[in-house]
Image (tube, rainbow, N blue to C red):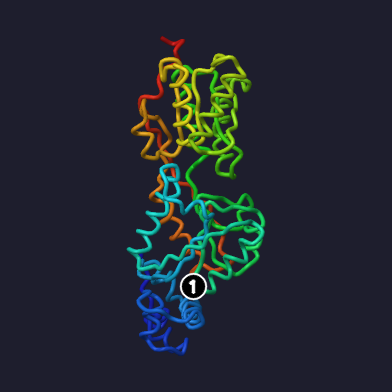
Amino acid sequence: MSRIVPAGDRAPKVGIKDVSREAGVAISTVSHVLNGTAPISPAVRGRVLEVAGRLGYLARRQAMGTIKTLQTVLIALPPETLAQTSINMVSWTMLRALGAACEQRGIKLEPCPVDSAAGAYRTIVDAIGSAGADGVLLLNVDEPGVLDALAQSEVAAVLLNAEDSQMRLDSVTPGNRFGACLAANWLIGQGHRRILHMTWHGRTTIRRRSEGFLDAFAESGLKRENALFCHATGWEPESGALAMDNWLDEHGGLDGVTAVFCAADNLALGVLQAFAARGISVPGDISVMGFDGIAPGQFAAPSLSTVNIPLDQLGPAALNLLAQRLTGGRDAPRQKLELGCELVIRNSTGQCPNQG
């Protein structure tokens, strides 16, 4: 049986007038803060949000999806990330999608190139002050010193395509380990048993792909010694081509390897070039798999099989986490969000040649 609650027992419904009165500002100011429709000083904006949160009005607006907490966001990133080139398509795809999401939501996005780990934190903090930014997204930045300083600061920060192994900061990444395991398992399912993983000494996100490669061998019960590694000097196609050439020279040919799984499409494109120059047939003699899902792979010869990551969704997801951090407060649990990946099988992969 339902219980009728006497009118006197119901908690009074808090409205915008209550927030206005408690914060000592006009109703229109509260509206501007919550809807992001006019520039408001950080001090006033902070007071309004504090009162709205304390009175429970903020939670109600959040539940209704009618609050906007971001006006200006700083995007800190290495300078080379800003270069719009054919080999920098991962970063530029993320940046374009982030910019579009900010434009749609009326958020001003301020770029902040950071050169060195030693001075990056100070550069970020100074830029936040100059721009009057509400928080910062860090694209491809995961230097320990920067993360340490941000974790101890009052800055609202979210890592984009990077992660904090100690989970002191919120982060958004593709499912790097999952995606790599998915790719290696597919190759194993095609009969490949001796597989070369080409990677480079990169950031944590790249190491996760190596871990996923080894996960597939462990899950399949295959011998660990058949999970081979080749480290390129970088992630560019020419680095992949050079590393593959050197490996072939050192091993006197393919040495029983029937598939190469690359930690980036750019590396895989270089591997395809190296094989073509030596007359090695792909996928007749060996299969090649990439990771990222950038457009050039689709038009390679042969077209590149790859792990497609949702590059256009990473930035918007990071924006949402940043908004949650601002409204949820410093003590809310940190979140590590990984977005799923999917395989795209094209012409560069097939059954192990020995399978017929």
Q: Residue at x 40, y 68 (%)?
A: 108
Q: Residue 230, percent across and down?
A: 59, 28
**Is residue 340 at least partly visible in the picture?**
yes
Amino acid, disc 1 = Ala
Q: Quadrant of the C terminus?
A: top left
Residue at the spot 34% in from the left edge and 33% down from the top edge: 299
Residue 10 visible within the image: no
- Pick whichever, 332 or 4, lies toward us: 332
Position of residue 178 measured from the top left corner of the image (x, y, whole percent): 50, 37
257 shown above or below 66: above
Q: From this view, report whether residue 22 is shown above or below residue 179.
A: below
- Residue 247: x percent and y percent? 58, 23
In the figure, residue 151 lies in which quadrant?
bottom right
Please tell me in which quadrant of the rendered image residue 1 appears: bottom left
Residue in view at x 40 percent, y 24 percent:
348
The vertical placement of 304 against 98, above or below, is: above
Provide the residue designation for mark 1: 131
Q: Residue at left 35%, top 70%?
A: 66
